Amino acid sequence: MSVLLIAEHNNKELRPFTLNAVTAASQIDADVHAVIIGQSCEGAAKALSELPLVKKIIQVEAIHYENFIAENFAPVVVKLANDYSHIICSANTFGKNLMPRIAAALDTSQISDIIKVISPDTFIRPIYAGNAFATVKSKDQKKCVTIRPTSFDPCESSGGSAPIEKSDAGEEFNQTKFIKREEIKSDRPELGTARVVISGGRGMQSGDNFKLITSIADKLNAAIGASRAAVDAGYISNDHQVGQTGKVVVPDLYIAVGISGAIQHLAGMKESKIIVAINKDGEAPIFSVADYGLEADLFEALPQFLDELNKLNTIQK
């Protein structure tokens, strides 16, 4: 049977992680169908149809789908599930809110946060904050699977021509009401998809000192992250948190500044391609996963780093 992917979008365009989820779905079965649920989402549906790995699009629209309330989305997917062996979506806030409802309605065990597909019924997922990996085999007839997007490459975004089929909307779930959405707008790359991330920890000592990181991030076109300790101390907002209880990132370059390297933080960044650590404590656990380590006072190292970046920019100009 085919695989059903739940597309993530903002009613105008696809979210980047949808492309990673398509890659994962195609490794389970080549016959990938995608459902897109929203309001006035024709543009996103068209972009989805152009993904070469997607063979069919099911578009479901209604005003009560506009704000992506999981209680409204879940019955749509459950209704479609009879024709599919697998239901797939990303293991982010969207997927973690939606998939458990679908799995419960289908009376099946959810397989969460997979990082590799071994076969259609066997997957690898991290456990114990990423310090071990479990190989999980499911005997359920229908499998509800969430994937860690950063563990799969994004699929090609053009060249496909999948047909778009309209499907009837379900009734609105009236016990949940949308109040408002607060979105943080930034010119910086999104933390979850950035190629370069620079994060600060408790060693930054205050929120004002994060200006040092901001200056370097501007030069590197980097996203800004933080450890939970820095967030809990009020140095920076929690949407910057990297770790087991924050975002999982896999950038090309991750720079950890003043971060000791608690196991919960390592779970969110240790798969980065290159890790650079700056910490004055030479015994800090962060050095155990770092490719390059600098044992130094960050308040001396960061200004020097910025000076060197400024010199490089001057040479390039």
Image (spheres, rainbow, N blue to C red):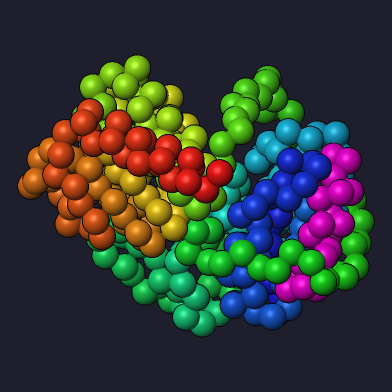
Q: Is residue 146 visible?
A: yes
For the N terminus, the image quarter is bottom right
Q: Residue at x 66, y 57 (%)?
A: 18
Q: Is residue 46 magenta?
A: yes
Q: Give the farthest residue toward the left.
A: 283
Name the side, left or right, on which 110 lies relative to 9. Answer: left
Name the side, left or right, on which 155 lies relative to 36. Answer: left
Asked which quadrant contains residue 309, the reply is top left
Name the side, left or right, on which 233 lies relative to 150. Answer: left
Q: Residue at x 89, y 48 (%)?
A: 42
Q: Residue at x 62, y 23 (%)?
A: 182
Q: Is residue 235 visible?
A: no
x, y (%) of residue 162? Answer: 86, 69
Q: Is residue 250 magenta?
A: no
For the C terminus, the image quarter is top right
x, y (%) of residue 116? Answer: 46, 72
Q: Nearer the viewer, residue 232 or 277?
A: 277
Q: Answer above or below: position of 53 versus 145.
A: below
* Magenta-highlighted residues: 37-58
Q: Nearer the viewer, residue 143 or 147?
A: 147
x, y (%) of residue 313? Answer: 48, 42
Q: Answer above or below: position of 147 versus 76.
A: below
Q: Residue at x 33, y 69 (%)?
A: 134
